[in-house]
Amino acid sequence: MNAAGAAGDGWGGGGHSSLHFFTFAAMVYKVIGLMSGSSLDGLDIAYVHLQESVSSSKETPRKWEYTFLHTACYHYTDQWKQRLANAPGLSALDYQQLHADYGHYLGSQVQRFIEEHDLHYQVQLIASHGHTAFHVPARKMTAQLGDGAAIAAVTGINVVSDLRAMDLALGGQGAPIVPIGEKLLLSGYELFLNLGGIANISAGGQGGEHAGSQGGPPAGGQGGGYIAYDVCPANRVLNSLSALVGKEYDEDGAMAARGRVDEALLQQLNGLTYYGAAYPKSLANEFGTETVLPMIRERSLSVEDALRTYVQHIAIQICRAAEGLLPAGAGGSAGMAGSEGGGMHRSSGSVGSVGTAGAGTPRARMLVTGGGAHNGYLTTRLQEMLAPLGVELVVPLSQLVDYKEALVMALIGVLRWREENNVLASVTGARRDSIGGAVWIGQEA
């Protein structure tokens, strides 16, 4: 067994007195978070320590502190890439077999991670997002591959999986689910941008209302004004275009930088119906592979021109989204605390700005994470286009860039274990906030 016992929940006694004085040591949760994104680059694993901050008053917003202990990305073999990519076309029996096989694969990769970092008997919980095969909110359906029972059986550790299903059942989009982590773990930003297989944006949590023309937050929920939605396909499309010339991705956006924008294609892309829809809204992977990529291929462009045009499309859609979500009267940026080394982080640690959002104090700060944050050409284009809005683009340390979603999955798992809300209705449009996730007990009784 690899499971660890509970830690940090001891009490101090009051001696022989009839009065009892208790000292509470806040629980430190030792969790592995698993994330497999739509870009199919690999399995992200983060072993983190999570601890709720002690609040001095009921009025103080809840916050959590985190520490990355170990991280890894285990790249998929070509066979696994093909199996995951082809999942939507399988028969029911073959799909369920893949679900079981991938769950056992995830368990074996966690075991490998535990061996490599000597984490035996230290991990209390595994929170697994799985790999999304279907996502159809209009029909209250989502499906993530990776059987949680298989992970628990292989590792002997308790597992939380199926993190989106409850929100879908309550009429929500089931996405994005990361904003709960942004709210509780990361402070000092008005906007959050994740550049993964799909780009999504978040805003809120500072107590202000949001201006804009793309709709407003739904009634109900306790999200504290949080709004988030999928903006457009991102790395999944960029990587598919790069694959045409035998590359896994466009390193630093070098090929895109050599290309030219095809204005006709750009106009077609920007005119897609999804972009005019009000939030809450979310995208399935097929929007990129079955709608966007065929449009690009029809133009018969060079790979460089196709990449350049699509980078421009991503930047335009993100800027439109940011403009609609900027908090009214947003002021200066909050100071950042923490460091790259030990200790719990109340924020993202040392960060670097891509550029300056005009003279003076920026109107808003946008934290950018996900694989696309390593694309220097894309982030430079974004900063140039966001600057007139007074938005400063901030790229944190690479560990947070690459493993933010795995970190948040770990937090979502802990909240589920504590039976606390871990999905925000203000983001997804569900009838209420919810406690999402199925629990699988890997430990023996």
Image: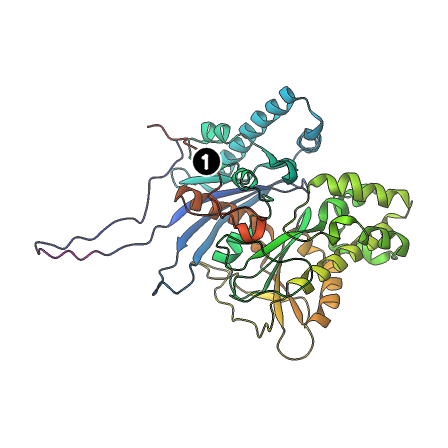
Residue ranking furthest to the bottom: 360
Residue ranking furthest to the top: 93
Residue occupying the point 16% across, 52% down: 13
Residue occupying the point 80% across, 54% down: 270
* Residue 432, magenta (yes or no): no
* Nearer to me, 438 or 372: 438
In this rendering, does residue 79 appear at all?
no
Coordinates of residue 367 in the picture (x, y in percent)? 60, 61
* Residue 18, magenta (yes or no): yes
* Nearer to me, 230 or 240: 230
Residue that badge 1 annotates: 159
Q: Is residue 187 left or right of residue 21?
A: right
In this rendering, does residue 282 appear at all?
yes
Determine the main secondary structure of the stretch shown in magenta.
loop
Marks counted in the figure total 1
* Nearer to me, 32 or 188: 188
Q: Label 1 sits on what residue type?
A: Val
Task: Assign a secondary structure to mark 1.
Answer: strand
Q: Is residue 427 left or right of residue 48?
A: right
Q: Residues within 10 Å of mark 1 (few under 14, many from 20)?
A: many
Residue occupying the point 78% across, 38% down: 290
Coordinates of residue 422 in the picture (x, y in percent)? 48, 47
Which quadrant: the C terminus?
top left
Coordinates of residue 62 in the picture (x, y in percent)? 42, 59
Coordinates of residue 179 in the picture (x, y in percent)? 55, 53
Which quadrant: the N terminus?
top left
Residue occupying the point 34% across, 50% down: 27
Residue ranking furthest to the front: 219
326 w.r.t. 11: above or below: below
Q: Which residues are magenta?
A: 17-22
